[in-house]
């Protein structure tokens, strides 16, 4: 019997904490009212927001130097859904899961969908995997060692397209409406392949995929500058990604993984550009110090993350615009669910902070060429402690005031470890 966390249970366990919360909330409300902030609007927007959990990050991640699994990892996609349901109960903001195929390879998609429905979880973008050979998708005589959609061999390209189409078919059965394509295609050695021919093959492959999209579906292309390809990547940056999206068709948009930029890239400006031309498709939230570190979003560069969310809220005219929000992380040390709780909390807090920016005053300061004032307007919002507003949004959604503490209090990991065992291995990163 799966372990469930319920709103009633949370409510009961947090009864005593409510008084302190209300005191903090009243104090903050009074302060923000003086600044002319509509706190109810901020709470409502945080309540409305949801971010998909990555199915591939519910188990322990690893590096090429090792992996240190913990107990109670989900053994099946059903058990991954159980973990997402627990996460959603705690945060009120993870109503969907993003699957990765064939790491997730359900035998009975209708049954999986029915189970997700029962848990109140939906399916966000599907992810295809043509970066690993897998007998069930690659087949005999074909390998992605030298690429997939960019491969010189038409058979390999055909197989990669077939896999992507199969992922779309599975997504249709699950009620998803998007496919995210991240390719490892590239080169490790100068001269290994022709940049242009590789790019053209990928562009044509994506166009074929676009043609195969059901109505209501969109295709997301995700760029990444390096890894596993160490010399060149076909979809290496937002410019390449935009070219690919434009070539593929109008329902193809660019997905921005926050860890997929070379050091010091101005990601908030990338977001602004893509949004401006209607090609911003979604996000993979995470943070990084050096490369694609897949650390908790906001843990290394919280101000940069704030500036990104500020661009979004400005673009959405005071609301998070309707693109796809997903977390993409790898949990080598932390409990995966704990990290996802933290990531979701950081996103919720950053949305609340970005909503505090006085955008009319900012525009005036920009037009008056007053960079000091403009910066202070951002700084005032970023320095605000919005945690009581976020806790209130969660409380109103039936979730926890303090989700990490609640996760520990209900003993979720111990309970699932008793059920799933100490050495359960999850598929994924
Ligand atoms: C990649 C990229 C993709 C993810 C894989 C597992 O670096 O971020 O989004 O699907 O990792
Ligand atoms: Mn990603
Ligand atoms: Mn990545």
Image (cartoon, rainbow, N blue to C red):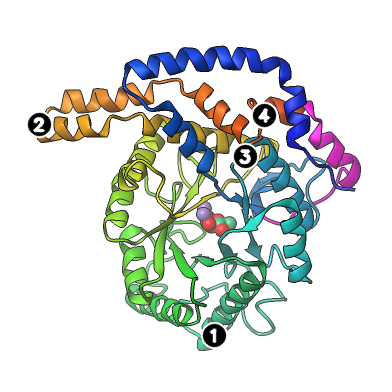
User: Which range of residues does the magenta coloring cover?
Assistant: 409-429
**N-terminal of the two: label 4 or label 3?**
3
Residue at left 44%, top 76%?
206
Dot 1 crowding, Cα within 10 Å, few <14, some 14–19, many 20+: some
Q: Which residue is mark 4?
A: 404
Dot 2 falls on a residue whose secondary structure is loop
Alpha carbon of mark 4 to alpha carbon of mark 1: how far?
45 Å
Q: Which mark is residue 158?
A: 1
Residue at left 54%, top 46%?
50
* Residue 65 percent coordinates (x, y): 65, 46
| Closer mark to the observer between disc 4 and disc 1 | 4
Q: Is residue 332 visible?
A: yes
Q: Which residue is mark 3?
A: 92
**N-terminal of the two: label 4 or label 1?**
1
Alpha carbon of mark 3 to alpha carbon of mark 2: how far?
41 Å
Q: Is 238 a magenta residue?
A: no
Q: Which residue is mark 2?
A: 369
| Closer mark to the observer between disc 3 and disc 1 | 3
| Residue 268 horizontal side relative to residue 147, left or right | left
Alpha carbon of mark 4 to alpha carbon of mark 3: how far?
13 Å
Vertical side of 286 occupied by 378: above or below: above
Alpha carbon of mark 3 to alpha carbon of mark 1: how far?
41 Å
Dot 4 falls on a residue whose secondary structure is helix
* Residue 42 percent coordinates (x, y): 43, 32
Q: Which mark is residue 292?
A: none
């Amino acid at each position: 019997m799966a372990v469930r966390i319920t709103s009633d249970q949370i409510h009961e366990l947090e009864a005593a904490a409510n008084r302190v919360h209300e005191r903090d909330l009243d104090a903050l409300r009074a302060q923000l009212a003086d600044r002319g902030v509509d706190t109810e609007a901020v709470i409502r927007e945080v309540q409305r927001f949801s971010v998909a959990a990555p199915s591939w990050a519910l188990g322990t991640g690893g590096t090429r130097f090792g992996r240190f699994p913990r107990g109670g990892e989900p053994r099946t996609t059903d058990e991954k859904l159980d973990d997402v349901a627990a996460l959603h109960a705690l945060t009120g903001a993870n109503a969907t899961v993003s699957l990765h195929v064939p790491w997730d390879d359900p035998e009975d998609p209708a049954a999986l969908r029915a189970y997700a429905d029962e848990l109140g979880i939906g399916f966000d973008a599907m992810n295809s995997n043509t970066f690993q050979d897998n007998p069930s998708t690659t087949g005999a005589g074909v390998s992605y060692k030298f690429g997939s959609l960019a491969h010189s061999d038409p058979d390999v390209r055909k197989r990669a397209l077939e896999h992507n189409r199969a992922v779309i078919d599975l997504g249709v059965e699950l009620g998803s409406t998007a496919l995210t394509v991240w390719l490892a295609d590239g080169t490790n050695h100068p001269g290994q392949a022709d940049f242009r021919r590789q790019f053209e093959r990928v562009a044509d492959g994506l166009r074929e995929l676009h043609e195969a999209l059901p109505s209501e579906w969109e295709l997301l292309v995700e760029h990444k500058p390096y890894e596993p390809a160490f010399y060149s990547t076909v979809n290496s940056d937002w410019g390449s990604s935009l070219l690919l999206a434009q070539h593929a068709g109008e329902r193809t948009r660019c997905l921005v993984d926050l860890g997929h930029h070379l050091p010091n890239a101005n990601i908030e400006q990338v977001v602004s550009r893509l949004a401006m031309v209607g090609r911003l498709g979604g996000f993979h939230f995470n943070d990084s110090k050096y490369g694609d570190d897949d650390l908790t979003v906001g843990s290394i560069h919280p101000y940069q993350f704030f500036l990104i969310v500020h661009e979004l809220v400005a673009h959405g005219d005071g609301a998070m615009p309707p693109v796809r929000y997903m977390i993409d992380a790898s949990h080598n040390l932390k409990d995966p669910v704990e990290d996802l709780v933290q990531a979701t909390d950081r996103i919720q807090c950053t949305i609340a902070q970005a909503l505090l920016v006085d955008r009319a005053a900012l525009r005036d300061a920009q037009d008056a060429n007053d960079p000091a004032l403009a910066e202070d307007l951002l700084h005032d919002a970023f320095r605000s402690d919005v945690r009581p507003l976020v806790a209130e949004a969660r409380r109103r959604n039936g979730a926890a005031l303090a989700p990490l503490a609640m996760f520990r209090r209900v003993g979720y990991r111990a309970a699932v470890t008793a059920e799933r065992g100490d050495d359960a291995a999850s598929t994924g990163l």
